Image (cartoon, rainbow, N blue to C red):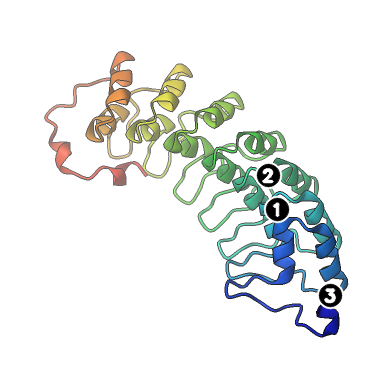
Amino acid sequence: MIDKGANIEARQTNGWNALMLVCSKGFESSVRFFLERRANIESRNNDGYTPLIIACSNGHESIARLLIERGANINAVSAKRHNSLMIASHHGQESVARMLIEKRMDLEARDKDGLTALAIACCNDRHSVARLLIESGANIESKTSIGSTPLSWTSQLGHESTARLLIEKGANIEARNDKGSTPLIVASVMGNETVAKLLLDKGAFIDAKTSSQWTALMLATLENQVAVVRLLLSRGADFNFGVCVFLLFPFFSFVF
């Protein structure tokens, strides 16, 4: 139909065209067909995704390589400023991420919230991609717009294996976000007992306080995180809070 005059750039309501669709499905021969007929290699859907970003999202390494060879902008970003490496990291596409790193993509590029590819991998518990990024030189202490490091994110979300990886690779277990919360404080308020235990086993300061003077035990008590409270008490956390008038106040704003 295209050879009969059909519009090669026709779009669906979500902004997807034929080239994007075949990139998402991994149909390499069809990708070549559209490229040979001069389909726009930098076209974007309603989310700002290019064919390259779409191919990387779905783990189609050979198509991603083809698009780059044909001149696709490897540094193109979506509406939320996610590039191909960030998207591959989000979806755990290790082989694609490795290829993009080999192409010398910027490991420290940031999305609109200040997350790097490593932070995104950690947020989504993509352990193998996180390891690849760290071993390729990604900054393990990079901070987002709210001051959270990759370890802080894994602690908040309860991703124990990725938190263990970060610690093994030298992440600062006392790093603080913009509210002064350490990974232990964040893990405790979210009730992530296994991560809290890991942090304590690795020497995290149990009585660290936020900028507003809240400890992990205080916040875990407020949130009724019983298992974490028991853990902290068993490890010797200071429980002399005084009169618990803080129960009257919201507390998440003191943590994140």
Q: Which residue is mark 3?
A: 38
Q: Position of residue 57 (x, y in %)?
A: 66, 53
Q: Which residue is mark 1?
A: 56
Q: Position of residue 238 (x, y in %)?
A: 26, 20
- At label 1, the amino acid type is Cys
- Specify whether residue 140 is in view: yes
SS state under label 2: loop
- Specify whether residue 52 is in view: no
Q: Is residue 110 left or right of residue 23?
A: left
Image point (64%, 62%), residue name: 77
- At label 3, the amino acid type is Arg
Image point (45%, 29%), residue name: 174
Q: Which residue is mark 2?
A: 93
Image point (19%, 22%), residue name: 240
Query: The N terminus lies in which quarter of the figure?
Result: bottom right
- At label 2, the amino acid type is Gln
Q: Is residue 95 left or right of residue 246?
A: right
Q: CA distance from mark 3 to mark 1?
A: 21 Å
Query: The C terminus lies in which quarter of the figure?
Result: top left
Return the disc, 3 or 2, that comes first in the chain's sequence.
Answer: 3
SS state under label 3: loop
Q: CA distance from mark 3 to mark 2?
A: 28 Å
Q: Which mark is residue 122?
A: none
Q: Is residue 249 above or below residue 2?
A: above
Return the disc, 3 or 1, that comes first in the chain's sequence.
Answer: 3
Is the C-beta separation of discs 2 and 1 under 8 Å? yes
Return the disc, 2 or 1, that comes first in the chain's sequence.
Answer: 1
Task: Count the marks.
Answer: 3
Foreground: 114 or 26?
A: 26
Q: Is residue 15 above or below residue 178?
A: below
